[in-house]
Amino acid sequence: GRLISALAEFCWYMSGSADLDFIRFYIRDYPPKEATGSIEEAYGPRLIGSGEFGQSYDQLERVIYQLKNKPDTRRAVISILQANDLEPERAEAPCTVALQFIRRRGRLHMIAMMRSNDAYLGFPHDVFCFTMIQELIARSLGVQVGDYHHFATSLHLYEEDVDRVSNYLGEGFQNPTFAMPKMPNGCQRENLRLFLEVERSIRAGHITKAIEIKLPTYWRDLSLVLLRHADAKMKRGM
């Protein structure tokens, strides 16, 4: 139920990283708990292709290229799940099968296809991260953000989380009329790159004060959320 966890996962994805130390800086018990180092089912290398696990492509760039050159294409798809993810010896596999982008009448629509989705721990983060990607691509194309469709073959809630869900809903902090600010107009890929550099510097302890963050307002505000978390960790001695 905290913004920091969803934002941190977005940063993890967009950096192309599979490093558990990265995401556990923000989400201490990020699963699988027994794992260390890098995990093969991480989305980052599949989206951005940092070269980790032999993946050296950038699916976001490919989708943007396709939608620019053929606006009505039906091939603007990011594949997350791979054939070897379903081998019997693999303990984990990505829940997301694919993300598809459809450009129609000046709007960019997005469809997320999930083989499995945890309604409490996974679904909220998925919607945040995927719609951020949708907005990034829309800005790169110079079109408006369209509809977002989320299809989950199995959308489930585990019994152990029922009380947590009830407590979360009972807090009374949710405000459905409050929306996150819109991403600025124009291509934001360079601002994203700079934002991810700031994130790395915050996590490494090289940026410790808000005055040290030199970014456009939208991206600076997101950076301040990360900085607040890092500052709290330092004060707790964690």
Image: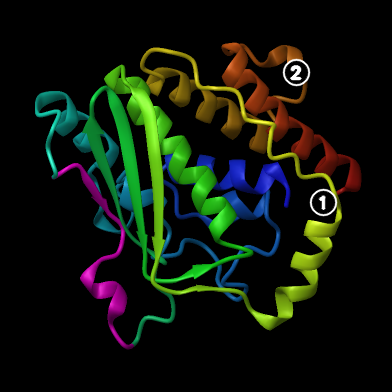
What is the quadrant of residue 80 in the picture?
bottom left
**Is residue 58 visible in the rendered structure shown here?**
no
Residue 186: x %, y % from top left: 38, 13
Residue to which mark 2 is pinned: 210
Magenta-drawn stretch contains 212: no
Secondary structure beneath label 1: loop
Question: Which tag is nearer the camera, tag 2 or tag 1?
Answer: 2
Neighbours of disc 1 within 10 Å: few (<14), some (14-19), many (20+) = few
What is the quadrant of residue 97 in the picture?
bottom left
| Left or right of 197 in this view: 162 | right
Q: Nearer the viewer, residue 14 or 65?
A: 65
| Left or right of 180 in this view: 106 | left
Residue 37: x %, y % from top left: 51, 62
What is the magenta range? 75-88
**Is residue 175 visible in the rendered structure shown here?**
yes
Image vertical order of residue 132 relative to residue 212, above or below: below
Residue to which mark 1 is pinned: 238
Q: Earlier in the sequence, mark 2 or mark 1?
A: 2
For image coordinates 68% across by 64% down, the residue present is 29
Disc 2 from disc 1: Cα separation = 21 Å
